[in-house]
């Protein structure tokens, strides 16, 4: 049995993982999926990581998973604790000293979105959240997710990621083939350039924990084999 620590994205809540949590618990694993203090202007990335570390407590055999903006927090947790693995799931991989606000230009996000949109007829980068984030999520579930959305503080978004190195732990990147927010080609390139790893691919949209929870759980379990 492992403990999967599931870190939600920007302005989101731990509830976003509930389907994946059920899948993992059915497989005999423990799960920690806290609500982060994402709207609290007194808590930056380091303090957000504190929240996760406190929620983990004395659990061991930990796999830390960061979704989207949660990659900035997941990496800090993986640097502080003896974790089994760090997983970026449709995640933002930080560079040393990089504020999350700078990630977009630094990775060439805009160009990648434009290139993908030219191929898929404008689905990528679409202004409609049901197209950009929740494509493939049942409409009532997507609407519930949107009703739970919160803001994201400047304290965590505009201030530098505080590490000068990537965590020295086994690290994986999972991209989603139907992601209209983070184009797959962008995720492959960032994984290679920033981590030196080849990204694994599963079906699903950006909010893949809601669209394909079984596939997420299966992929996470594969990492337990090493």
Image (spheres, rainbow, N blue to C red):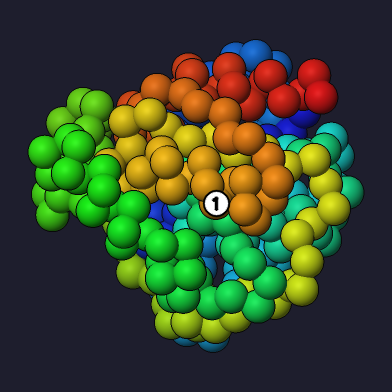
Kindly indicate the quadrant of the structure image that contains residue 61: top right
Mark 1 lies on a secondary structure that is helix
Q: Residue at x 73, y 42 (%)?
A: 171
Kindly indicate the quadrant of the structure image that contains residue 120: top left
Which is more toward the observer, 6 or 203? 203
Where does the image place residue 224, in percent across and percent down from the top left? 77, 23
Q: Is residue 211 above or below residue 96?
A: above
Q: Is residue 47 left or right of residue 57?
A: left
Report whether residue 17 is seen: no
Q: Which residue is mark 1?
A: 190
Q: Residue at x 46, y 51 (%)?
A: 68
Kindly indicate the quadrant of the structure image that contains residue 163: bottom right
Q: In which quadrant is the N terminus drawn?
A: top right
Where does the image place residue 28, in percent across and percent down from the top left? 70, 17
Report whether residue 106 is seen: yes
Q: Residue at x 11, y 38 (%)?
A: 121
Q: Is residue 155 above or below residue 123?
A: below
Q: Is residue 194 above or below residue 156?
A: above
Q: Is residue 223 left or right of residue 111?
A: right
Q: Is residue 121 above or below residue 22?
A: below
Q: Is residue 132 left or right of residue 22?
A: left
Where does the image place residue 24, in percent across and percent down from the top left? 60, 22
């Amino acid at each position: 049995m492992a403990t999967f620590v599931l870190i939600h994205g920007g302005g989101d809540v731990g509830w976003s993982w509930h389907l994946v949590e059920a899948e993992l618990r059915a497989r005999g694993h423990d799960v920690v999926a806290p609500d982060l203090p994402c709207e609290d202007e007194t808590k930056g990335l380091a303090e957000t990581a504190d929240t996760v570390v406190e929620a983990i407590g004395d659990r061991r055999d930990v796999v830390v998973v960061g979704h989207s903006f949660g990659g900035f927090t997941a990496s800090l947790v993986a640097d502080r604790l003896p974790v089994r693995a760090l997983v970026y799931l449709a995640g933002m991989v930080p560079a040393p000293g990089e504020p999350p606000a700078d990630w977009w230009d630094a990775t060439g996000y805009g160009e990648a979105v434009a290139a993908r949109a030219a191929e898929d007829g404008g689905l990528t980068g679409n202004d409609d959240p049901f197209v950009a984030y929740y494509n493939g999520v049942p409409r009532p579930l997507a609407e519930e997710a949107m009703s739970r959305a919160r803001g994201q503080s400047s304290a965590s978004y505009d201030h530098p990621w505080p590490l000068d190195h990537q965590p020295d732990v086994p690290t994986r990147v999972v991209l989603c083939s139907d992601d209209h927010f983070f184009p797959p080609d962008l995720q492959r390139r960032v994984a290679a350039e920033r981590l030196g790893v080849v990204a694994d691919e599963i079906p699903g949209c950006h909010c893949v924990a809601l669209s394909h929870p079984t596939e997420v759980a299966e992929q996470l379990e594969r990492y337990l084999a090493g």
